[in-house]
Image: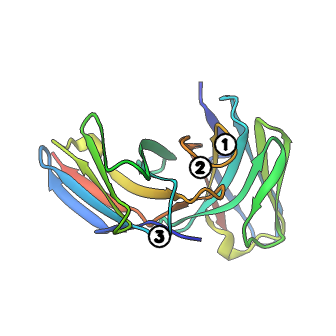
Amino acid sequence: SQQGEEDPQALSIQEGENATMNCSYKTSINNLQWYRQNSGRGLVHLILIRSNEREKHSGRLRVTLDTSKKSSSLLITASRAADTASYFCATDDGNNRLAFGKGNQVVVIP
Amino acid sequence: DTAVSQTPKYLVTQMGNDKSIKCEQNLGHDTMYWYKQDSKKFLKIMFSYNNKELIINETVPNRFSPKSPDKAHLNLHINSLELGDSAVYFCASSLSRGWGNTEAFFGQGTRLTVV
């Protein structure tokens, strides 16, 4: 099964800075989703971008998708301490499987 | 109200024991899933049920057996627990079969430790 692969694995930034994470995948997809996981908690859906979309915004989140490069990026603007979490991309290949990558650990320093 | 709830949150047990994890969703979703998250936070799908019917059964040892008494519940029973079964197990649900354009709702996870 395919998986999204985030890059980089860990990111430490100051509050107020922007955080960018990248994700690559291997096969064709229906959509790509980003999730956040706070320590000791379940995953929470952040945003979904369909294969025919190139960019999507939700509050301080901006997601891009480049299907020709099989990659996506998640930008968190004006980061806050509460944004400290692991961020996962997940690809929906249309076969009832949502394949997750390894995740990015983001630490926002107050 | 919790949308997807799992019990217990923590489970410590000895090798060779049999244990169950329960999951319930009150979202009216048709599809439920079990994922395993290892120590490196990698998430791997184990099973998926749609309206009580098994639709995904990944390469998981036979010691793991899911059971869905109705579409709001998906339990996971594990026989003869092994050290390598230690992980966090997540239940999730989605509106319908196939992820399509629907998001997944996750439970809080069950941290299983086999000693």
Q: CA distance from mark 3 to mark 2?
A: 15 Å
Q: Is residue B47 left or right of residue A81?
A: right
The chain holding disc 3 is B
| Residue bearing the label numbered 3 | B40
Q: Amino acid at mark 1?
A: Gln
Q: Earlier in the sequence, mark 3 or mark 2?
A: 3
Q: Is residue A70 above or below residue A51?
A: below
Inspect this view and state whether residue B104 appears: yes
Q: Is residue A77 left or right of residue B50?
A: left
Q: Nearer the viewer, residue B64 or A101?
A: A101
Q: CA distance from mark 3 to mark 1?
A: 22 Å
The C terminus of chain B lies in which quarter of the figure?
Answer: bottom right
Residue B85 horizontal/vertical position (percent): 68, 70
**Label 2: how many residues lie within 10 Å, few (<14), some (14-19) or many (20+)?**
many
Which residue sits at x=15%, y=41%? Answer: A78
Q: Amino acid at mark 2?
A: Gly
The N terminus of chain B lies in which quarter of the figure?
Answer: top right
In which quadrant of the rendered view does residue A72 lie?
Answer: bottom left
Q: Secondary structure at mark 1?
A: strand
Residue B21 horizontal/vertical position (percent): 74, 50
The chain holding disc 1 is B
Residue B6, numbered circle: 1
| Residue bearing the label numbered 2 | B109
Q: Secondary structure at mark 3?
A: loop
